Image: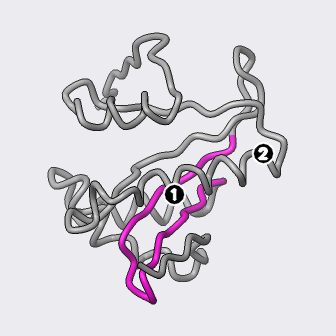
Amino acid sequence: MDLVVRFIEKEKVDQILPLLSQLNPNISRDVLISRLQDMVLRSYQCVGVFENEKLIGISGIWILHKYYIGKHIEPDNVFILPDYQGKGIGEILINWIFDYAKSINCEASELNCYTENEAGRRFWEKQGYEVVGYHFRKKLS
């Protein structure tokens, strides 16, 4: 496979919507579009994996600063198209993200993974992540 990993330009970020829809099937396309537009106005960036010019994988990234971990990168909504899963593409993507994080002096990386996503948990642990706590949320509406 001839793969290229690169940032997706903010003007072209809507090309990730088909992959986001597969990853988040319970969120309407309109809501995904609205949230993506809002995120792009902030510090959200998206990285794509391309086979030739076909987008086959994505990861959002956030650069954050927190007391307990310092400057860090957070991969977000990482998704590889099903036909390409299990071929090492996720690891290529994550290693690209780690290299980028180091280039901008991040001290660490952290992320969220749904508790029912056993395959995701195994993948993240294989990449060197460790479970250190719980992620809580409360909807306000």
Residue most extreme to the bottom: 53
Amino acid, disc 2: Lys
- The residue beneath circle 2 is 102
The kind of secondary structure element at disc 1 is helix
For the stretch drawn in magenta, the main secondary structure is strand
**CB within 8 Å, label 2 to label 1:** no
- The residue beneath circle 1 is 93
The boundaries of the magenta stretch are: 43-63
Residue most extreme to the top: 133
Residue drawn at 42 percent across, 34 percent down: 124
Q: Quadrant of residue 34?
A: bottom left
Neighbour tally class for label 1: few under 14, some 14-19, many 20 plus, Cα within 10 Å: many
Give the colour scheme shown. Answer: one colour
Amino acid, disc 1: Leu
Position of residue 10 in the picture relative to residue 23 (left or right): right
In the rendering, at what x and y percent does residue 18 appear? 27, 72
Is residue 40 or residue 67 the one in the foreground? Answer: 67
